[in-house]
Amino acid sequence: MANDVLRIESVRIHPGSATREEAMKEAADLLEASGSVTGEYFSAMQQREETVSTYMGNELAIPHGTNETKQAILTSGLSVVRYDGGVDWGGEPVTFVIGIAGKGDEHLEILSQIAILFSEEDDVARLKAASSPEELFEALAGSVNA
């Protein structure tokens, strides 16, 4: 897998809440800022969300584009935003919104790493307890920057 799909500047913590739309926009904007995707990626995320929710359980949502919009991905990348006030994700409570852009088939590998991490309640608790973006980055990077 490509090195460093997650970079410190793509990790944020917000004390408040956001709408699903706002959270997806921020995920897409962070991916765009890191050079992973083009400006089209946000609408690709919206298309995906219309057909299938990207809510994963354990307070996690992983917005990503559709297969038809692969050309919007320049390089594999992740963005991570923690909303301490929560996000109503189509009726499900979400704290972590992880934007995923996977070049080729890399997103499958990235998704499996994240799924493993968020399947452990202790790990989720540790991610929620991180008091700064730096701490949150450190807690995640070991899993995703293989």
Image (cartoon, helix red, strand yellow):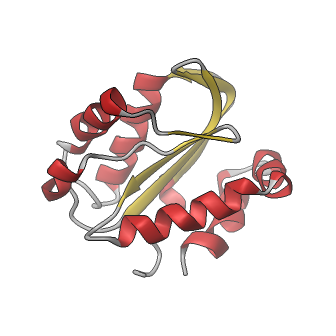
| Residue 93 drawn at (x, y percent) | 66, 26
* Quadrant assignment for the C terminus: bottom right
Considering only vertical position in the picture, is 99 above or below 82? below
| Residue 26 drawn at (x, y percent) | 42, 37
| Residue 115 drawn at (x, y percent) | 61, 58
* Quadrant assignment for the N terminus: bottom left
Does residue 140 appear anywhere in the picture?
A: yes
Does residue 6 appear anywhere in the picture?
A: no
In percent of the image, x 56 and y 70: which residue is there?
144
Determine whether, in the image, residue 75 is placed left or right of residue 118: left
| Residue 52 drawn at (x, y percent) | 38, 34
For this rendering, which residue is in front, 51 or 9?
51
Determine whether, in the image, residue 137 is placed left or right of residue 105: right
In percent of the image, x 46 and y 71: which residue is there?
109
In percent of the image, x 36 and y 32: which residue is there?
49
For this rendering, which residue is in front, 66 or 99?
66
In percent of the image, x 19 and y 56: which residue is there?
70
Determine whether, in the image, residue 137 is placed left or right of residue 76: right
Considering only vertical position in the picture, is 63 above or below 25? below
